[in-house]
Image (spheres, rainbow, N blue to C red):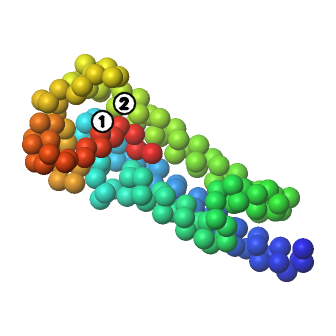
Amino acid sequence: MSRSLDTELKSKLLQAVQTLTKELTCIVQDGREAFKASGDISDFVKSHGSNHFHGLTLIYPVQVYVACLKTAGVATRKDLEALWTRLYSDGTVREAVEELLAVEENWTSFVSELDQEMSDYEEKTAFGAIKVGEYFPLDLPLIDTTTGDNLLLKSVLEKSPYTLCILRKHYV
């Protein structure tokens, strides 16, 4: 492979990885600050569970990764890793990749903390009474994350006989 092609690939890879690292760092910092400010997991979910808080919805991090892959000129994470493995002997590539991996670990840690908080909260609420394989009670309290409204499962199911409910606990 020519030296100029490697230089071009390195430049694209560095731009992609550094931008991804910066975006993910902001997402984690914003999320941690918002969680700390809310003081309580239920308040945090009520105020940050909808799409207005880009960092804790699935779509924004996915968009950031898609942009990274496009910038690097690859189609998958596996392809991205293969590219950085090929160029890893370069100090700037190695440093950029290590920073990205550290930020991804930080994201994973943050989401695990939220998950633990949610698990603790659920055990103290109606969710704690529900076991795998059992029916949900119709008086199960829910939060409409698009409006922030409190409602019951029964009211959601009464709106249409063809209602699809996605009861989501995880942020990723």
In terms of depth relative to the viewer, which is nearer, 132 or 51? 132
Query: In the displayed structure, does residue 75 sit left or right of residue 121?
Result: right
In the displayed structure, 100 sits above or below 165; it is below
Query: In the displayed structure, does residue 142 sit left or right of residue 111?
Result: left
Q: Which percent across, then down, holds residue 141?
A: 16, 33
Q: How many angstroms separate mark 2 from mark 1 (CA)?
A: 6 Å
Sequence order check, earlier mark of 2 and 1 = 1
- The circle on residue 117 is 2
The residue that disc 1 covers is 41
Query: In the displayed structure, does residue 110 sit left or right of residue 139?
Result: right
Mark 1 closeness class: few <14, some 14–19, many ≥20 residues within 10 Å = some
Q: Which percent across, then down, holds residue 50?
A: 28, 53
User: In which quadrant of the rendered view does residue 157 lie?
Assistant: top left
Disc 1 element: helix
Residue reaching furthest right? 2
Determine the residue positioned at 76% across, 73% down. Answer: 9
Image quadrant occupied by the C terminus: top left
Q: Is residue 38 visible?
A: no
Determine the residue positioned at 64% across, 60% down. Answer: 76
